[in-house]
Image (spheres, grey):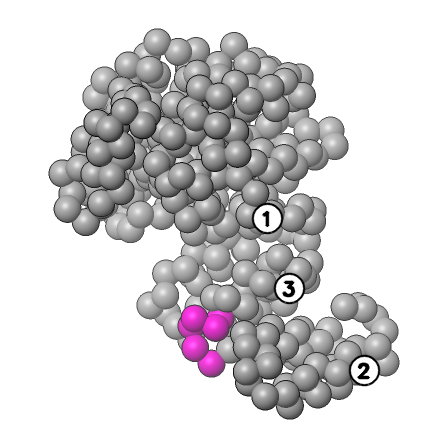
């Protein structure tokens, strides 16, 4: 959208308004986006925010579309402020609001698609973050695009994003790269390009196991983890978490091997694992304890009075996430 051409904005708004006259079946979900874009136009023309949503589900969908296609940081703040105030019981809006307050300017325009390997190079980067997505393909509720703007860019970091389309906490490897061993070998080849930078693996939720296991096999010295699995056995004891039982069934069927994560970490070049977790979240605390009880390399960051699976926004807001990424060994490349 043109930022300063009022006539162009008026013409675009008229065109979008005419589209809204089409039958709902023709528009399908496009009506949400059209309403959003008209709100952005009103903001650009008059500085007036007109909420484009009437329910929290619409607001959620519109925000992620907005984050993917607009660099207007102030409009995003207005949008999320209104959503958080209108739907105060929706944790996600307050979480994004907290993250947006830490961003000082519109950030770089990396695009994050559905590929299970994505490489985003930042000129002059001194750090390379290897990010392991959770089961749903994102990062702890904030998504990779917002993670890049709020975390990777301030850290002057390249960002390599990996996704586990097999949904087996990376034990079955990364689908496009092959099984676990093949995936490790090919990720090592990718990271060869960034040998002159510090390399840190990070993962949230289902990505924690992958980030830690791959780091151990790749020779990555530092892991930053956010509330995720370190033990399949702990997961199996929870009847609500069927993915762990499916993983165990696959292991028993010989589809891939079981990994004892503490042993792997203790025998690796990993020097430090920063582990963020909510103190009131019993399952996540048990996963932390399963690793730190057998591994002295773990540095816990426990938000004692918090509940909920996601603490990323608190770690970004209070700066401890940035301290964690900077606290590891300063050696470049892989061990």
Residue 257 image position (x, y, % from top left): 30, 22
First in sequence, mark 3 or 1: give its number. Answer: 3
Q: Out of 312 and 60, give the one closest to the viewer.
A: 60
Magenta-colored segment: predominant secondary structure = helix
Which element type, helix, strand or loop, lies under badge 1? Answer: loop
Does label 2 or label 3 sit earlier along the sequence? 2
Label 3 element class: helix
- Which residue is rendered at x = 35% and y = 9% of the image? 267
Q: Position of residue 214 (x, y in %)?
A: 43, 23
Going by the image, does 324 lie left or right of 230?
right
Q: Which residue is mark 2?
A: 11
Q: Residue at x 63, y 67 (%)?
A: 75
The residue that mark 3 highlights is 74
Q: Quadrant of residue 242?
A: top left
Query: Which residues, given as a range, are shown in magenta?
Result: 54-59
Q: Position of residue 26 (x, y in %)?
A: 60, 81
Which residue position holds label 1? 113
The N terminus: image quadrant: bottom right
Point out the frontmost of discs 1 and 2.
1
Please state which of the two labelled residues, at mark 2 or mark 3, is closer to the viewer.
2
Q: Secondary structure at mark 2?
A: helix
**CA separation, marks 3 and 1?**
24 Å
Q: Would you call the spot at circle 3 few (<14 residues within 10 Å), some (14-19), or many (20 or more)?
A: some
The relative height of residue 77 versus residue 290 in the rendered view (above or below) is below
Residue 249 place in picture, x, y as percent: 22, 34
Question: Position of 214 compared to 241: left or right?
Answer: right
Q: Residue furthest bottom?
A: 21
Q: Is residue 121 above or below residue 329?
A: below
**Of label 1 and label 2, which has the lower sequence position?**
2
Q: Confirm or deny contact between disc 2 and disc 3 (CB under 8 A).
A: no
Say if mark 3 contacts mark 1, CB within 8 Å. Answer: no
């Amino acid at each position: 959208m043109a930022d300063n051409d009022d006539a162009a904005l008026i013409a675009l708004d008229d065109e979008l308004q005419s589209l809204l006259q089409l039958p709902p079946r023709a528009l399908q979900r496009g009506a949400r986006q059209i309403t959003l874009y008209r709100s952005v136009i009103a903001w650009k023309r008059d500085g007036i925010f007109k909420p484009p949503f009437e329910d929290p589900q619409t607001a959620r969908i519109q925000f992620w579309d907005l984050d993917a296609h607009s660099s207007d940081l102030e409009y995003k703040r207005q949008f999320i402020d209104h959503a958080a105030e209108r739907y105060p019981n929706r944790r996600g809006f307050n979480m994004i609001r907290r993250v947006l307050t830490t961003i000082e300017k519109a950030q770089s325009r990396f695009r994050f698609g559905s590929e299970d390997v994505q490489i985003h190079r930042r000129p002059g980067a001194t750090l390379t973050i290897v990010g392991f997505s959770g089961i749903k393909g994102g990062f702890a509720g904030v998504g990779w695009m917002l993670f890049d703007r709020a975390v990777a860019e301030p850290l002057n970091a390249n960002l390599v994003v990996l996704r586990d389309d097999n949904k087996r906490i990376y034990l079955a490897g990364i689908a496009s790269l092959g099984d676990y061993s093949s995936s490790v070998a090919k990720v090592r080849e990718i990271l060869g390009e960034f040998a002159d930078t510090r390399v840190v693996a990070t993962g949230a939720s289902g990505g924690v196991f992958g980030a830690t296991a791959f780091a151990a096999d790749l020779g990555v010295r530092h892991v930053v983890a956010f509330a995720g699995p370190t033990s399949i056995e702990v997961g199996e004891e929870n009847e609500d978490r069927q993915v762990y039982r499916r993983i165990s069934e696959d292991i028993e069927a010989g589809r891939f091997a079981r990994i004892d994560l503490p042993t792997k970490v203790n025998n690796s070049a990993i020097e430090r694992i920063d582990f963020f977790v909510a103190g009131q979240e019993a399952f996540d605390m048990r996963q932390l304890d399963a690793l730190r009880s057998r591994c002295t390399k773990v540095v816990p960051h426990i938000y004692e009075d918090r509940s909920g699976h996601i603490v990323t926004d608190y770690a970004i807001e209070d700066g401890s996430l940035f301290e964690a990424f900077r606290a590891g060994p300063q050696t470049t490349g892989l061990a």
